[in-house]
Image (cartoon, rainbow, N blue to C red):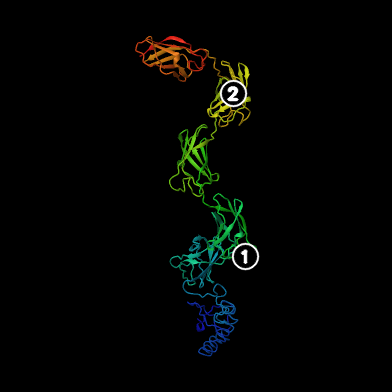
Amino acid sequence: MGFGGLPSFAHTSGARPSGSSPAPTIIKPSLAPTILPSRPGSGPISGGGYSGSGYSGGGYSGGPISGGGYSGGPISGGGYSGGPISGGGYSGGPISGGGYSGGPISGGGYSGSGYTGSGYGVLTVASGPPELLEATSNGDLITLSFDSELGASNPSSSRFAVTSGGKAVPVVSTAVNAADGLVKITLARALTPKDTSVAVSYTDLKNDQTSGVIEGVDGSDLASFKNFTVIPQTEDSSAPVVSSAAVDGALLTLQFDEALGGGSLPSASSFTVTVNGRPASVASVSAEADAGLVTLKLAKAVQFDQTVELAYRDLSGDQTSKVIQDEAGNDLATFSKLAVVNNTFDPTPLDVNLVEVDGDTVTVSFDKNIKATVPSASSFRIEANGKVLKVTRAATFPDDRQVVLTLASAVESDDSVTFSYIDAAGDQSKGAVEDLQGNDLVSITKRPVKNITPDLNPLSLESAQADGNAIALTFSKPLATTLPTPSRFTLLADGKKLNVKSISSTPADGVVTLNLAKAIPLGVTVQLDYSDQTGDQNRGVIEDLAGNDLASIKKFSVTNFVLDEEAPNLIDATVDGKELVLFFDEVINPGKVLTSAFRVEVGGKRAKISGSSVSVDKDSTEVVLMLNAAAAPNAQVEVSYTDSKGDQLDGVIQDLAGNDLESLRRFSVENIA
């Protein structure tokens, strides 16, 4: 230390004083410089409390201070005359214009600051580890300021950890400005006003290191520290940005990428909301500034399936009120047609619009948008003609609102297919079909599936049968409802052309009926031609359900029954108790036969027949008579039948062609009782 506690100063610039001793040795004090009280005058050395006092002409006057080893004394005209005080070795040095410019020597104790020049001004050369005073950031640089000079050791970047909002920001490199007590840390990216709660930590290595760590000039290592707050110095010039916009009923919420200024909000007229392209009134505007949220309350709630857009108009110039701005005062810029996510609850359940199968692929279409969750294949059950087909894979296509299933085996074009879906109990978040709000598709049982599998089997005519003035055409499969035009057909009966008057059909049975202008006589040979049009037609032709046209047909034989003029013959008769059965050589026309036409004799005596009539079954060659009393075993039984005059239509025995059974007398009946 110098006089009266003044610090000793290193001779850093200027010439050594003439006739003086070598420059003073640098002394490393263990404490910071003593702050001298400010006094009037030019400072503590001259004209102040230390002039003409204990240090002038006193104990040090004429001694080692004046005229001695320090000729003229250190204050005036001696070794330091024109020396360290003025214009000498310290001129332009630490006394004036240097580290202590305006410092303890001139202008008062530390008048003019004492912390001017670099960081904290001239730093003392202290013993012991340095102390971290402040950490500041600017862009990608963090500066650590210490209370004293540092050693020349450059710390490894791995010693530091920097976080922003709790998330790590990588450190690229470090540099030390030892004389100014500074350590500079370069980051992998620049810090912005959006980086909050920035902190720096430092880990010291064990033992005393000589490199790779922060240390004082005496080699003392800086101790580890954690989460030291970094003060940002970067100016925020970026306007806030809308990071998301969503509406739920009548509340439209805007989330910004940073906190907002807490000033007054814009009026509702600054916003334009459209719902399905039509303006919607904004009733009020509110905000949570710290959270970066602005909420618009609409005069009328939106529906779940409506499309919402938002526009905002910023006032001209830089406003301080009635606009949206961040904490730095940057105004939100004008924007238009911002898509707003509609989160309004949809009360209607998810349902299936259509299910189609094409070979081994089943496509399930839904009535609204679905999530991308992939349902389990085991949740589906596909049946073709009642037989279960295994589902090997399920895939979801949200953009198309579809789920596509792959079957282990393909269905045929004419298969009847059903679709079932089993929803697991509870509300599922995966392995199920659900809408955008997470509502699961409910279970479905055996919903009919539209089978669009191509039919590769050609349509063919199997038979044609004439019946009077109609010809029935029977095909190999069900038909479409389209009717062919009469001009498609050519009919020849014994070589003569027949005119087709009209056409009707029974598509499900695969039958087309040609109605003729004139009846075809029985036994006449009939041939049919059909002409298909060129190309694939969808009207005016015969086609199957898949749209495959019937190909042209040439000289197809039409069945035309030969005229039957033969009456049925009774070939046998038996009696068993009360039941008497008559057997004929052809099918008898079904209907009622009057019992009065019969006479039955048992043992030479007439036996009564029950009822007034007997019934003849369809496709039967038998007529059954029931007697009132059973015929005695071994009794002789005979039956007689009287045909009415003329050709009868009912009440008599006749064949399918209408030929009546002729009268017969005493036909022997076998008694099998």
Q: Can residue 551 be seen here? A: no
Indicate which label's residue lies in the foreground, 1 or 2: 2
Rendering coords of residue 30 (x, y %): 47, 77
Q: Position of residue 313 (x, y in %)?
A: 62, 59
Location of mark 2 (residue): 515
- Spot occupied by residue 274 in the image (x, y as percentages of width and height): 60, 53
* Residue 545: quadrant of the picture: top right
Q: Are marks 1 and 2 in contact (CB under 8 Å)?
A: no
Q: Which mark is residue 520?
A: none
Q: Measure the alpha-carbon separation of dots 1 and 2.
A: 89 Å
Kindly tell me whether residue 581 is visible in this rendering: yes
Residue with the mark numbered 1: 319
Vertical placement of 436 versus 672: above or below? Answer: below
Label 1, residues with CA under 10 Å away: few <14, some 14-19, many ≥20:
some
Along the viewing direction, whichever of 463 and 58 lies nearer the viewer: 463
The local secondary structure at tag 2 comes to strand
Quadrant location of the C terminus? Answer: top left
Given the image, on which type of amino acid does mark 1 rest? Gln
Q: Position of residue 31 (x, y in %)?
A: 48, 77
